[in-house]
Amino acid sequence: MENSNQNQNEEYQEVLITRIELHSNHAINPQPINRQVAKSLKNLKPGMAHGGRITKIEGNRFEMVLPLKDVQVLPNGKKIRYVYPAGGVPIYLGKDAIEKIDALRRKGLIK
């Protein structure tokens, strides 16, 4: 997630969603996504957020829901606008998920 807003006079602060990583382990005591985004914007640095639920729709299709507030207003009065790249957001497996899959393969539990 990156701060993509160049014009400081706009009423929105844009946050660019750059990638999604899927993990097998749950984050320990994660902060709410809105708080993590606000911290990243305050520091003017890219950040990470933990959360969301994945639901299988049908076949190999899944749906991911991020628990974001409809409108989040920053202390400077700007509203956050989430922006996605035109080509979509790439989804990767996290290192821990890859290690878990490899371990299950070695045990013969998956092919």
Image (cartoon, rainbow, N blue to C red):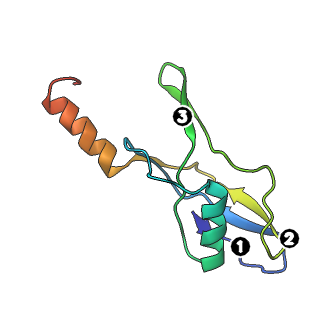
Identify residue for label 2: 11
Q: Nearer the viewer, residue 50 or 62?
A: 50
Q: Position of residue 23 (x, y in %)?
A: 40, 45
Tag 1: amino acid: Asn
Tag 2: amino acid: Glu
Q: Badge 3: how crowded within 10 Å, few (<14), some, or many (20+)?
A: few
Picture quadrant of residue 8? bottom right
Q: Badge 2: how crowded within 10 Å, few (<14), some, or many (20+)?
A: some
Q: Residue at x 67, y 58 (%)?
A: 34
The local secondary structure at tag 2 comes to loop
Cα distance in 3D space between marks 1 and 2:
10 Å
- Is tag 3's residue or tag 1's residue first in the polypeptide sequence? 1
Q: Residue at x 58, y 50 (%)?
A: 87
Mark 2 and mark 3 in contact (Cβ < 8 Å)?
no
The local secondary structure at tag 3 comes to strand
Asked whether residue 85 appears in the rendered view, the answer is: no
Identify residue for label 3: 54
Tag 3: amino acid: Ile
Q: Is residue 74 above or below residue 89?
A: below
